Amino acid sequence: MSDKEIPNIIVGRLPLYLRSLQRMKKEDRQITSSQELGERIGISAAQIRKDLSQFGEFGKQGTGYTIDYLIKQIRRILHIDQEWDIAVIGAGDIGSAVARYKGFANRGFRVTVIFDGDPGKIGAQIGDFTVQDSAYMVDMIKKTGIRIAMIAVPAAKAQQVADQLVEAGIQAILNYAPINLNAPSNVRVQYIDPSIHLQRMTYYLE
Amino acid sequence: MSDKEIPNIIVGRLPLYLRSLQRMKKEDRQITSSQELGERIGISAAQIRKDLSQFGEFGKQGTGYTIDYLIKQIRRILHIDQEWDIAVIGAGDIGSAVARYKGFANRGFRVTVIFDGDPGKIGAQIGDFTVQDSAYMVDMIKKTGIRIAMIAVPAAKAQQVADQLVEAGIQAILNYAPINLNAPSNVRVQYIDPSIHLQRMTYYLE
DNA sequence: AGCCATTTGTGCAAATGAGCACAAACAGCG
DNA sequence: CGCTGTTTGTGCTCATTTGCACAAATGGCT
């Protein structure tokens, strides 16, 4: 373990390890090995060991890894030993589904507010949330100090929303709109676009 | 250009190029260059040229790429010069949102049927679809010859659904459930899990 | 026609990533 | 307590991926 910067590709695998470990925990498992973990995820055991070794020595020779302990460590590394508040922008089908999604529990996140600019949607109830007017979005995000946002508006409006989010101080954006966003380099952006994934598969179907 | 197998990582970038090109087309652009495309996506121009050159010579020196032509070529390479029918499994929030999603239009896909096992949901109307009983899922998929499916059921049921889909002859699965699926190697699987993307970003937030 | 400004496709070198294989560490057991 | 069967962490090698840099091609302009 050194203090050199960790490659992105390794950081990207940690959440996969974590998800699998949490699954094992749910199955009441106590201990696992790099081999077992690798088989579940489809990654070589050596790679998992090497990835983890970038951050410390979490395993025990001859035994493997204590699931609970490794979960705790990875959560710490990924800074999800806390719960992050998330703002959802767009109360259409996707925004609604995300706002109601139970899957963030225990993964480090919690949707706390949802915005939309459509007068027909403002004030509507979605799960536990009342749709807020996006006219107040920048102010509300600034005031609450929320640092992560999900964009679930049509592609045509996504860049404009992103610009506002940056202005509001948002530091991480998960974008469901199928376009590339321009954002300053200190703002992280990730994308979810099902068509992209599907197209990656149809290449292999004749 | 040779006939050697194309690396996965290159195939994975083609959909990004395509999405950006289609966006340019919408902006009534006729021609682009590897440089411009690269700036939009955040990839070096050389890499784009090299990626594309794996499949043919699509550009013209001194000019660049004709957007329409390049779109057509990439669609052909990715086998989306046709529309693929998709079965959605699970009529909860995510399944419903996906079934109503307008974003597949012009990207090569079309949801044609949605299944659920919950008697309270079977027969319900979701957009243009009536929720089908998943008891008939295997038969219906076999009969219709659908080759791509999206799993939008709770994690606990996802593997079981995947097994049925494999039995039904499905060859590509896009899984929204937050677990790794076991599937034979001739069945492609891709994952969408927003928590994973969020965790990849919180690493960089202190 | 000749020149200039562009831009592609690609050979080659550099950087990055993955995997093998093994010493060291450990648990269980007789 | 020593032996056996595991499993980690890691040095080293191999493979993959990225980027540089340039010849060749092209269009526009004078």
Image (spheres, coloured by chain):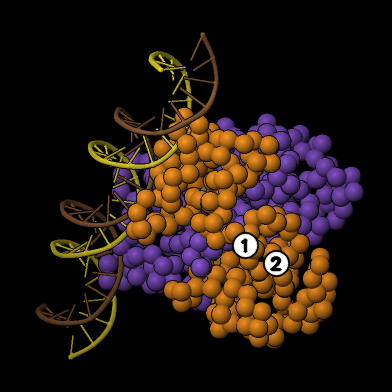
Chain colours: A orange, B purple, C brown, D yellow
Q: In the rendered structure, are the residues bearing label 2 and label 1 in contact, judged by CB atoms less than 8 Å apart?
A: no
Q: Amino acid at mark 2?
A: Val
Name the spot of residue A22 as percent of width and height, x first: 63, 45
Regarding residue B165, the answer to whether it shows in the image is no
Q: Nearer the viewer, residue A157 or A37?
A: A37
Closer to us: mark 2 or mark 1?
1
Regarding residue A76, the answer to whether it shows in the image is yes
Q: Quadrant of residue D25?
A: bottom left
Q: Quadrant of residue B66?
A: bottom left
Name the spot of residue B171 as percent of width and height, x first: 60, 38
Instruction: Label 2, secondary structure: give it.
Output: strand
Instruction: Label 1, secondary structure: give it.
Output: loop
> Which chain hosts label 2?
A
Answer left or right for A147 relative to B21. right
Name the spot of residue B164 as percent of width and height, x first: 71, 34
At 81% from the left edge and 57% from the top edge, which residue is drawn? B126
Location of residue B44 with respect to B29 vertically, above or below: above
Answer left or right for A52 relative to B50. right
**10 Å crowding of disc 1: few (<14), some (14-19), many (20+):** few
At 51% from the left edge and 77% from the top edge, which residue is drawn? B27
Location of residue D6 with respect to A132 vertically, above or below: above
**10 Å crowding of disc 2: few (<14), some (14-19), many (20+):** many
Answer left or right for B64 relative to A176. left
At 77% from the left edge and 75% from the top edge, which residue is drawn? A131
Residue at the limit of the structure toward the right, as seen here: B120
Report the Cα–Cα distance between label 2 and label 1.
14 Å
Location of residue A204 with respect to B111 vertically, above or below: above
Residue A111 - label: 2
Q: Quadrant of residue B202?
A: bottom right
Residue beneath disc 1:
A82
